[in-house]
Image (cartoon, rainbow, N blue to C red):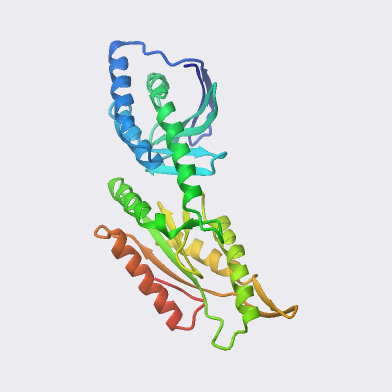
Amino acid sequence: MVVSVHAKMQSEANADKTKQILHTDASSGDKLDLKMQLTEALQASIDLNALLTIFLERVSAVVRLDGILYINEDADVKTSIAKQATHSCGYRLITNEDNLGEIIFKRGRKFTEKELSILENLLSPLIHPLRNALRYKLAVKAAFSDVVTGVVDKTYLQTNLVREIDLAKRHNQAYSILMIEVDSLGKNASRALLKQSKLALTDLAQRIVELSRQTDTVYRCESGLFMVTLSNTDRTGAHVIAKRISESAHNLVLMEDDKAVQKLTLSVGMAVMTGTDTNISLVDRASKALNNAKKRGGNLIHS
């Protein structure tokens, strides 16, 4: 198969270098064996993050890598695996069939010409598995999307959490979650106002998505309850995102008889993963933080 790959290497001095590779033939028996081993290993998973993790671990055996950043704008995918270091070399994966996005290798020192050549040769075994993983991810997203808000339904939450926590621990990365709930409208809220609040959930969900990063995932857990999983995010970063989301809700006004009646406010519970956390314990801590925010009157971020 002919694969068009454009490589770009960047350093702190912003030195740029561009290459174009029209095919990826192995130049030695060792490279051929490694490509065969890599091809076999990549058949082990159809999950995108797991696939990229396998690729990173196998390739790192011959070219030291600290992490991978993968971006596919057409599929609305941006995911990082392991550490995101200073120096990088990026390749656009363009085949005769489609554009599979860009993969960027990261590490703390510059890549040599020999290392770039090895990386280029090892990209071809990734093409078919990557295409299949993208198709699977899009199919799952469509199947598990909440019909009202369009974000991911809670059915898919626990499976994702287990996998993402495992990856974060394996690569010593920070990981956080936010539990976000619309504050109560009060016992005397009219039917019209309650209907307006339901309609506002769609707008709220979209704002949460827009204010989160492409590497984050937004889930709808219950009527007015959402969860955001934040990969490679520590306490400071999680609080910044939580504050943006909380403040954005203030612009959503509930109407009754064509009059503005009440602004929407949110309570947010935040939990940052520790070394002993499981998916259950992490969600439990975020839930307790959310309850504490609500008990203190709502419109708060608590951790």
Q: Is residue 111 above or below residue 297?
A: above
Q: Is residue 107 above or below residue 275?
A: above
Left or right placement of residue 276 versus residue 194 in this view? left
Q: Position of residue 273 (x, y in %)?
A: 33, 60
Q: Residue at x 42, y 37 (%)?
A: 133
Q: Position of residue 222 (x, y in %)?
A: 46, 68
Q: Nearer the viewer, residue 284 or 148?
A: 148
- What is the residue that sits farthest to the top in this orientation? 28
Residue 64 seen by the camera: no
- What is the residue that sits farthest to the bottom in this orientation? 188
Q: Residue at x 40, y 40 (%)?
A: 48
Q: Nearer the viewer, residue 188 or 241?
A: 188
Q: Nearer the viewer, residue 149 or 233?
A: 149
User: How many tags in the picture?
Assistant: 0
Q: Is residue 151 above or below residue 33?
A: below
Q: Residue at x 32, y 11 (%)?
A: 28
Q: Nearer the viewer, residue 295 or 255?
A: 255
Residue 87 seen by the camera: yes
Q: Position of residue 151 (x, y in %)?
A: 52, 56
- What is the residue that sits farthest to the left in this orientation? 276
Q: Position of residue 75 (x, y in %)?
A: 54, 40
Left or right placement of residue 257 versus residue 26 in this view? right
The quadrant in which residue 84 appears is top left
Q: Residue at x 62, y 81 (%)?
A: 191
Q: On the rendered image, what quadrant is the C terminus found in?
A: bottom left
